[in-house]
Image: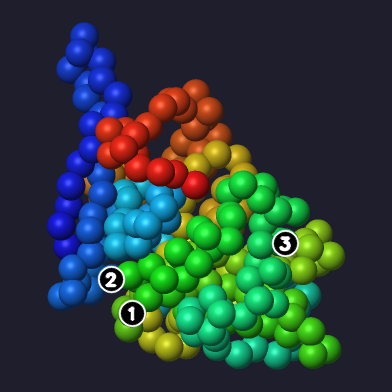
Amino acid sequence: MKIWHSEFLQNYGTYTFGYGVYASLEKSDKLSAIYEQGFLPYSGSKEVTDSLYMARSARVSLPQFEPSSENRRILKKFDGVFTKSPVTAATFAEDKERIAFALSYFAKRHDAKLMPEERLKLILAHAVAPCAVQYEKDGKLAALTLLDGDTAMQHFWYSFYDLSMVDQSLGMWLMLDAARDAKAEGKEHFYVGTVYGEKALYKTNFPALSWWDGKDWQEDVSALKARARTDSERTAGGRDVWKAEEELF
């Protein structure tokens, strides 16, 4: 892994100098070692498929993970409802129905501009070697999850699902189901992505959660919630030097 930095903001008066922290994958890298240092796969620039970025990510310690009462309430809603099967990234990328399903979900749930088809296919070709899990209900596609990892960890990267079930917490159920699978496979950690802003607070409902503060993994979830709730006070505009030279999605 090659770690590099890209200059961003500065306040010379207080000797505060900001840099974006990135990593480029190399053939000998083990993903779990890279994630351990606070990195997640980057997919925001066109044609960039081998880079990761450092951020406030969160992970679950799977040996200690046992679903909470709230987790169990959500699990009961969908356990036994779906049939589940693995899907390779290449198969996903070549299948028009799966691509259309994922893009439709993103357009309705978030914003179509955030996930154009070009970006989705770039993600499926990323060097972290993602894979997918397909969930079907009554023979029809109901959800897809996109994961990456190795023998020691699993990263829940994206989910795409039938929005008629959004008010039943299907999105959280998919994460919990993936965490159960990862624990059953003997993995050490389950990464749930970044925790920034109020909308990401649902991830703090995982027991045995820790989060990256830029130096170490912290277990104080109250502090994580406090930071997420005040992120709007620390938001900066613009791009770092590297992104300024890239064509972004």
Instruction: Point out which mark residue 104 bears.
Output: 3
Instruction: Name which residue lies at 23% across and 58% down.
Output: 24
Which is more N-terminal, label 3 or label 2?
A: 2
Q: Is residue 77 visible?
A: yes
Task: Determine whether, in the image, residue 46 is placed left or right of residue 92.
Answer: left
Give the mark nearer the N terminus: 2 vs 1.
2
Quarter where residue 82 is shown: bottom right
Q: Which residue is mark 1?
A: 150
Q: Earlier in the sequence, mark 1 or mark 3?
A: 3
> Residue drawn at (54%, 76%), measured in percent from left and top?
93
Residue drawn at x 34%, y 57% is 48
When the figure is inspected, residue 111 is found, relative to residue 191, above or below; the finding is: above
Crowdedness of circle 3 by 10 Å Cα count: few (<14), some, many (20+)?
some
Q: Secondary structure at mark 3?
A: helix
Q: Which residue is mark 2?
A: 31
Regarding mark 1 in the picture, which secondary structure is present there? loop
Q: CA distance from mark 2 to mark 3?
A: 30 Å
Q: Secondary structure at mark 2?
A: helix
Instruction: Locate residue 138, reporting x and y percent.
Output: 83, 89
Q: Amino acid at mark 1?
A: Asp
Q: Residues within 10 Å of mark 2 (few under 14, many from 20)?
A: many
Spatial CA distance of label 1 from label 3 is: 29 Å
Q: Is residue 81 above or below residue 30?
A: below
Left or right of residue 98: residue 48: left
Q: Residue at 77% x, 69% y: name it.
A: 162
Q: Residue 185: where, in percent of width, then height? A: 43, 88
Q: Do the residues under discs 2 and 1 have CB atoms within 8 angstroms?
A: yes
